[in-house]
Image (cartoon, rainbow, N blue to C red):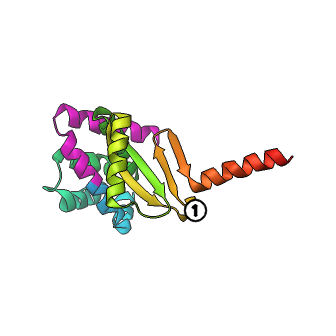
Amino acid sequence: MTKAEQIYGGSLYELAREEGLADEIFRELSSVVEILDEAPDYWRFLGTLSIPKQERCAALEEAFGGRVQPYLLNFMKLLCENGSIAQLRGCAKEFKRRYHDDHDIVEVCAVTAVTLSAALRERLHTKLQAVLGKTVELTNRIDPACMGGVLLELPGRQLDGTVKHRLDALRGELKAATL
């Protein structure tokens, strides 16, 4: 994430928080990025500097006017006018980071060999919230290479309880013992 994305995304978050719109803009910003990611040609159009600013901003107005908070729409227009609409993703990440910090939310990814069952997912979610003392947004990523168990990816750390990790550790111990 660039410094500009941190500054812009942080500024949008501060404005949204001051205006009591953080929840609404958080949801809308996430949706806007998803929508734009599904339309790469539209991203390119908005980022094409040879197209007049007014035309690109009018396209944003047509697509999102009345559908998102005016602060968010004006923010996107500002990025478009500055030729930095491609930084919207990074701005959204910074907004999300600050939102999560303020609301004691932590994202955890459980990497498993197979999809977690609903019951196991709920048990893991409940346990993580109790241990971390925060609201947990739990996602599940499938990686057959872990063979079994679970690798928990948290901000700044990993907890590896996979079969692969255990086998690698055992392999290292056996190698050290035979030398």
Residue 95 visible in the current orientation = no
Magenta region: which residues?
1-30
Q: Residue furthest left?
A: 66
Residue 158 visible in the current orientation = yes
Q: Mark 1 belongs to which amino acid?
A: Ala
Residue 178 in the image, given as x and y percentages of width and height: 84, 48
Quick check: is 15 in the magenta stretch? Answer: yes
Label 1: how many residues lie within 10 Å, few (<14), some (14-19) or many (20+)? Answer: few
Residue 124 in the image, given as x and y percentages of width and height: 37, 48
Quick check: is 40 in the magenta stretch? Answer: no
For the point 18% across and 52% down, which residue is it?
68
The residue closer to the viewer here, 26 or 142, is 142
| Horizontal side of residue 105 vs 175, given as left or right | left
The residue closer to the viewer here, 163 or 102, is 163
For the point 36% across and 44% down, which residue is it?
91
Residue 3, picture quadrant: top left
For the point 20% across and 58% down, which residue is it?
64
Residue 42 in the image, given as x and y percentages of width and height: 33, 65
Q: How many marks?
A: 1
| Horizontal side of residue 176 vs 32, given as left or right | right
What is the secondary structure assignment of the residue under circle 1?
helix
Q: Main secondary structure of the magenta part?
A: helix
| Horizontal side of residue 173 vs 106, given as left or right | right
The residue closer to the viewer here, 169 or 143, is 169
Identify whether 121 is placed above or below 41: above
Residue 116 in the image, given as x and y percentages of width and height: 40, 60
Which residue bears the numbered disc 1?
Answer: 145
